[in-house]
Amino acid sequence: MADLHFLTAVQLSEKIKSKKISCLEMLDLFLARTEKFNPNLNAIIYLDKEAARERAKEADEALAKGESWGALHGVPMTVKENFNIAGQPSTWGVPDLKNNIAKEDALAVKRMKAIGVNFFGKTNVPLLLSDWQSFNEIYGTTNNPWDLNRTPGGSSGGSAAALAAGMTGLDAGSDIGASIRNPAHYCGVFGHKPSMGILPTLGCAFPGGHVPPDISVIGPLA
């Protein structure tokens, strides 16, 4: 299906709900794009293919019964590495935390799952989310899909690069000093820093903390 990987999340959801494509077919499309382009980009640094494929199958079974999980039923999504997802690494790019595994989902992740999103991977960040590029010693360097010799920005650079390459249907990042807006600009995608307090940051803090600093917010990239 031509250019399906560049449709909006709402458009992807409409394709699924109208049964023009199954949830599993859509996930496999994005996984195939990831397999093709990610080796050069290094934007998606953690994949959970099997769990995502199982959720996609469950989403298809629900649709077959006339059930809807919500506005983004079955839409494949990635998320910035600092968002906790139970059983997945959350390191902030700090080598000493390379074995840190989240015990529960961030509140935003729970809410996205509650409206049907299918998370299949996490995207790269700079050390401590504190740079306008996306390199750390755990995952390496993320490159800009428009020019592999240039940076995608940071600190949500992996998120922006993955979207620009059509490897994911939606992503979410965090922002203090342009960490969503900067990479969105560098990669030619949409990124929004919401007003403080609109979206929950619980589960997006440095490992061992509860919530990020007061000036930090989370927001969408699309």
Image (spheres, rainbow, N blue to C red):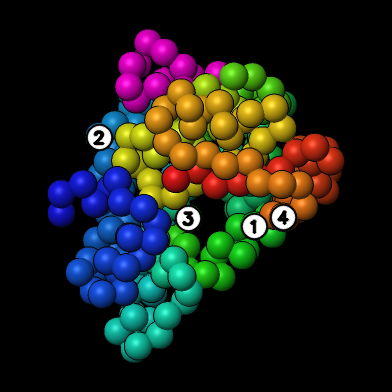
Q: Which residue is mark 3?
A: 119
Q: Residue at x 58, y 34 (%)?
A: 180
Q: Is residue 137 magenta?
A: yes
Question: Quarter of the image containing the C terminus?
Answer: top left
Q: Which residue is mark 2?
A: 36
Tell which circle, 2 or 4, labels the residue nearer the N-terminal end.
Answer: 2
Magenta stretch prevailing secondary structure? loop
State which mark lies toward you, 1 or 3.
1
Q: Residue reaching furthest left? A: 2
Q: Residue at x 60, y 58 (%)?
A: 109
**Mark 2 secondary-structure assignment:** helix
Count of marks, rendered view: 4
Badge number at residue 108: 1
Q: Amino acid at mark 1?
A: Ala
Q: Quadrant of residue 144?
A: top left
Q: What is the x, y in percent for residue 86?
A: 63, 56
Q: Residues within 10 Å of mark 1 (few under 14, many from 20)?
A: many
Tell which circle, 3 or 4, labels the residue nearer the N-terminal end.
Answer: 3
**Mark 1 secondary-structure assignment:** helix
Q: Amino acid at mark 4?
A: Ile
Q: Amino acid at mark 2?
A: Lys
Magenta-drawn segment: 133-152
The image shows residue 110, relative to residue 59, as above or below, that is above
State which mark lies toward you, 2 or 4.
4
Q: What is the x, y in percent for residue 189?
A: 42, 36
Alpha-carbon span between mark 2 and mark 1:
29 Å
State which mark lies toward you, 2 or 1.
1
Alpha-carbon span between mark 1 and mark 3:
12 Å
Badge number at residue 198: 4
